Amino acid sequence: AGVVVLAAGGSSRLGTPKQLLEFRGRSLLRHAAETALASRCGPVVVVLGAHADTLRRELDGLDVDVVENRDWREGMGSSIRAGVGELTSAGTDVTAVLLTLCDQPLVTAGVLRSLVDRHAETASPIVACAYGDTLGVPALFDAALASELAHLAPEHGAKDLIASYGSRVASVHVPAAVVDVDTAGDYARLLASHELVSPA
């Protein structure tokens, strides 16, 4: 499975690039890319948009493909399209596409592997993470769905596609995926819950 790390957003609710917030000694962006690589699922594509030039430096030395989505303002669908396009154009024979976000820092390489394993067990077209009362990303989509992902309306995210497959979606229970960082309060809670605030 190829992994697409979605990191193109403008962090409008935070007012500063969330991709650069520090967690466990590195930025959320680098953390997400390293997690994707550590899962050893397959090639990793990172989609950047806002602040792309600054963020690119965070990925120095990592074996990832970086694609810049100049249409990132249009919405998540445009970034998914850019990432899937990069993955499939590289000619790599991926059996599935795994979408993950840069702002879910508690998602581990093991979580990503479990999606791949569940896909192998069930042959379901989609394997999504179950958390709260939702099914969402990280999520794995069978390669047969690559063109559907590539044709998502820009303003639509993966959740709409997951919902459209209804009972055919397999899931893995991942409570940690509920933690995402959209606001300063989210970030403060993340650090407090992990007691990782480094002394000034």
Image (cartoon, grey):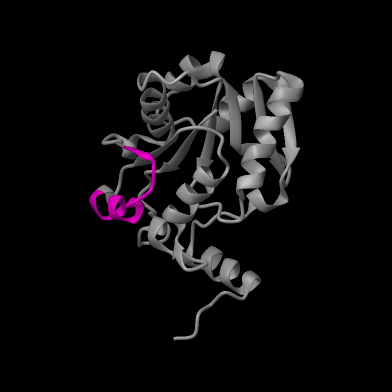
Horizontal side of 96 relative to 110 (left or right) equals: left
Quarter containing the N terminus:
top right
Q: Is residue 5 magenta?
A: no
Left or right relative to 78: residue 140: right
Picture quadrant where residue 74 is located: top left
Residue 16 drawn at (x, y percent): 35, 62
Kindly give the residue lying farthest to the left in the view shown: 53
Q: Please, is residue 117 above or below residue 184 in the view?
A: above
In the rendered image, the quadrant that contains the C terminus is bottom left
Q: Is residue 194 above or below residue 40?
A: below
Residue at the limit of the structure toward the bottom, as seen here: 200
Residue 171, percent across and down? 73, 33
State which region is magenta.
Answer: 53-66
In-image side of 31 versus 116 (left or right): left
Q: Quadrant of residue 113?
A: top right
Instruction: Pick whichever, 116 or 72, lies toward us.
Output: 116
Q: Nearer the viewer, residue 45 or 130?
A: 45
What residue appears at the point 38 percent right and 60 percent down from the top-left corner? 20
| Residue 149 spot, x, y in % from top left | 48, 22
Residue 188 percent across, percent down from the top left: 54, 71
55 in magenta: yes
State the residue at coordinates (44%, 64%).
26
